[in-house]
Amino acid sequence: MKYTVVAVGSIASSSVAIAANLRAGTSNDYSKENESRSWMWHDYGKLDPEPTSYWLGDDNLPPWIKNHYHPGDEEIFPELGHPLYREMFIAGLDDIMVDESEDVLAADELDERRLQHLHSKKALVESSCNFSPEDVTLFDPMDQNKCTLWSSFISENMDNIIKIPCGSCITMDVLDGSQISLLYGLSIVGRLFIPNDASFEIVTPWIIVEGLLEIEASSEDRKIPSEKQIKFTLTGTENVSFTPDMATDNTNHCESGCNVGVKPFVVAGGRVMIKGMNDDCPTWTLLLYIGDADGEVNNIIRLKDPQAAKCWTTGAELLFTSDQTGLNGWDDDHIAVIDSVDTATGEIKLVSGLPKKKTSIEECEGCDDSDGFECNCENIAVEVAILSRNIIIQPDEVLDGIGNHFIVYHTPNVPQIIQGVEIKNSGQKGILGRYPLHFHMSESVFGSVVSKNSVRDSNQRCYVIHGSHNVTLSENVAYNNFGHCYMLEDGGEWDNLFQNNIGVRTKVLPIVDHPKHGLSDHFPSTFWITNPANEIIGNVAAGSQSSGIWFELRGINEPSKSLPINHGIDTRRLALGRFKDNVVHSNRGNGLALYPIGYFAPTGTTFENTYVYKNNGVGIFFHGVTNIKIDGGYIADNRIGMRNFAVANSILEDVTVVGVSKHLNYMINEGRVESFCHPNRHMYGVSFHPNEGIGHGTQFYNIDFSGFTDSNGCKTSNALWLENDQTRSHLFNNVQVFSDVTFDSITNRVTVCEAIHNSHDGDVTNIAIEANGISPYNRGFYLQDSGDQSLFKHLFDGGESCVAVDGSCLKYCADACLRLVIFETTGSSWTDDIQMVITDTATGIQSFDYKHMWRPSTNIVNKGFYGAALPAGKAFSVSFLQRGTKVWPDFVYEKYEVAPQCNVSLRPDITFDYPAPTSRCNQLIKNGDLEDGSYVGWQDFFTDFEMVSPGADGSDYAVKTVRRTVAGGHVSVHNMLDVSCLRGAQGFAYQIEGKIKILNSEEEMIACNPGASCSPRLTLKYETYNRQTSDRSAHIILREHLSTLSTGWASFSFHITLPDDIVEATQATLVLDQAAGYNFVLDNWSMEVEQTFSTFPTLSLNPSPMPSEAPSEM
């Protein structure tokens, strides 16, 4: 029997051209003020409360990306961390702005918000006509025995709209698999009940549920697949627009029609209760055994979960994940069809055997009793998932990547149950909001469960949670899909649970197919997490063309940003929901990544029991993270086990790290897997980075390293290695902690060779690694073994007892106990050739270091650094030489890294040896007349300079700012003063003079009076520094607004007297700022003393020596 029903009525198909209407912002009851904020500045000077992201394909790509971009780059796999990705994010986003003055939202206030279940004005509600009169809080179950049968309903309504009215109930009574053709769609405003013995296919251009669609739970003996199947096939090529039914409580919404796209299955103010799979039937499990039968190979399997054999049956399609390394094996999954099942033994016979043997739990041929943890093949057995279901949602055809889509649309506070559905060929490539299964701006939907479903062959993404909270996604399967798969779309999604899901073969969605610019689906991640306040438990990400699990905390985007719950939230600082028992393997890129934006996690943030193996890129990739603990787990057979970039106070504990496992070697020897090693490729276990900032870098507790040997076939193989990428100042300032760390070899433990011989930003120096926990003797230090032996000079024996460690570029000094000290100074280029000299005041032995910088520029935020590693029990003086003359590089701050374990109170005794005042102190402005044709000595705060001609008073040159008009004016000009001239010059008088013009965006000179918004502000200030607490205090000597002329150069002149406490100054600068939107032109600046240098007092300019005991806190 075939039904063909032509419906007309209040819901009809129409064309709504702009699918982006779904992205329209909801009402915002909060306005975010931008006043009184202090900003960390984006590296390219854009002041904006949102981080700026650029993506390949954007028309406005800045030069620093465009120069590295070639057409087609987006279509090849770009491993996270490869040069293109690095340029896009590190060069452009490493200095992402942070609103430092905004208070962090109190935890109790955030919790209260999350419990309020607030909803926007666009929210749809369940209609009262479907509620029980006795209890308006309960949806009336409408006993199906009292419902009208579908066959009767259809016969009575052949010439009317196919709409189940609000308050009425229809029971589907088609049981024979017949096709029901509804040419103009199906509107469920009341209730449609489908019993578990129904079997049919509805073919229609759209389904809109404003009431209740219920599919009864499968019977206990129902297997998959069953002869009784329910199919919804969506048709058509035109966009659909709907307005809520007049009988509902939502008539004030979508008055001009809401666009829901092509081939939609929509839940709008209604609910679905679909239970197409029994609760005790697994959707995936591990392969226990694989064998041969009846002359075929690999056609008999048994599974770890015996329940699978009781509910999976003949005809079911099974997915076997890859057990290959990720470079060429990320998509080495296989599909097989069940031929028969022996429910007594649990043995499953396949129609055709797999083309290759897969790793099973019972396969331990490559192990022996000495392997311990490795010998348990359950850690690495492939997963087997069932793709088939008895309820299917699909399109009639896919044209140009356009399939059907399923959306829960603006429906808060209504629990949805979607269980046991197979969603095939769904999603709509390049169209925003058109995904296989999608909760769209539904806010809190507490009680909603999406479980045991199968999304396969999707054209765009898989399971998408957008602006919605409290959804449980469990035991779902995803296979062969384009773009991010399980994902949180805007970053404004809270308290969702992803548990025991599996995703396989997640493919690149090319940039040209993205639904909007700024997305990252061309680096697809099987789990894409944009808000850490969600739970990720027991999931498997197996075989992505890029990464397995990616935390990309890029902030909250609209429309979610406008929801009250998201006001003032910085997702990079939120507490992590549980992250536990997740498995990530066989990905072409990285396994687990927090990259590139980072995560400033609260203390105690923990990733528990994470299994990461056989990834071609990096097993775990952390960038810009703090306070994260990897607690338990297995990191094995990755090209690089774990990389740590700019990681502070992070911990690895109770983790096994394996280079090449014995089982992988066994598979290589069997010809079943291709090694990721070759003679030009390094293999490393866990990295630590030279530049982690003051404080602990990565701490290692109870870590077992094995499988790092020279026989692996890689160029090098080491358990620990010092990063050579993005070494920034290329000065080692990172303190590690090692405790209960074990190795299976006395060699191949640690190397720094790449960092000191092949660093991208400059060879790293000052490497001093405490050896406690990693040396065979559990004491001493590893020191950099290179041409410069400065690190050894201040050891008590001068380093004579230190011994070289083969292949590491280190020497082991068993008796050394040192503390790293970093000296921060100006980054101005005039100091580039200044050498720091550290002198042992007792012996006269000296060591030397030159300034280290990252990204040399005039920008004042780019500091210079010197470094040393010094012992206790000696006194040192620090001075600076420039071409043999004692100088002072404007200012110097010493910063002590965390004290070593060998002496937790170690603090070197350091004094500064300032040069005596000379004629250099008569005029303190550097290059004030600019007549050398350069702006050396001048520094900017994100404005940049250019030289212009002519200068003032007939001179050749002046300096001009170039970006103050486009950067909003929040930029400044600095000239740092030689503080060694000011210390001891208290009471001295100086005259400050100069010439200035200001230009508008049309390059016209502007006349401006002091106090007007166009008036530049001149400030002379200095800082004092408490060397015990590292606190800085600012002091203002002069602050005046300047007048300018429209006809030429304006002059200024001020007389100042240095205060008494200038003797304590550690930094001083002359600053020009304000006048937002105008560029400055400057010339003939000076700051001259009114006495001559010979009148400077004779006095000691050295401070008192530092105390030997450590302060209470560092």
Image: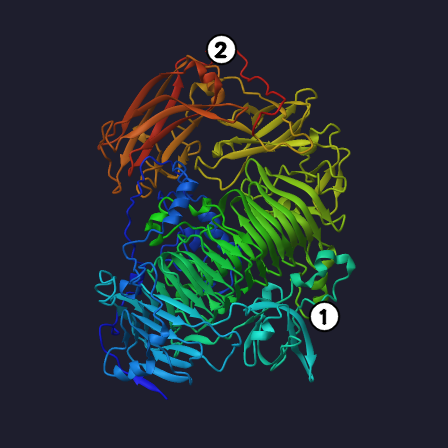
Please state the horizontal and vertical placement of residue 475, each as a whole percent of the image.
Answer: 52, 64
- Residue density around tag 2, few if under 14, some if 14–19, many if 20 or more, within 10 Å: few
* Count of picture labels: 2
The answer to whether residue 83 is left or right of residue 191 is right
Q: Residue 782's quadrant in the figure?
A: top right
* In front of the other: 170 or 303: 170
Q: Residue 910's quadrant in the figure?
A: top right
* In front of the other: 581 or 743: 581
Could you tell me which secondary element the residue under label 2 belongs to?
A: loop
Res. 674 in view: yes
Residue furthest out toward the bottom: 1
Residue type, mark 2 in image: Pro
The C terminus lies in quadrant: top right
* In front of the other: 163 or 561: 163
Query: Would you name the residue on which mark 2 appears?
Result: 1097
- Up/down of 957 relative to 158, above or below: above
The answer to whether residue 492 is left or right of residue 586 is left
- Up/down of 789 relative to 751, above or below: above
The N terminus lies in quadrant: bottom left
- Up/down of 574 relative to 159, above or below: above
Res. 44 in view: no
Please state the horizontal and vertical placement of residue 605, each as a whole percent of the image.
Answer: 53, 45
Query: Would you name the residue on which mark 1 appears?
Result: 670
- Up/down of 196 relative to 850, above or below: below
The answer to whether residue 207 is left or right of residue 801 is left
Q: Does the CB distance between marks 1 and 2 fall below 8 Å?
A: no
Please state the horizontal and vertical placement of residue 665, each as a whole percent of the image.
Answer: 72, 63
Q: CA distance from mark 1 to mark 2?
A: 83 Å
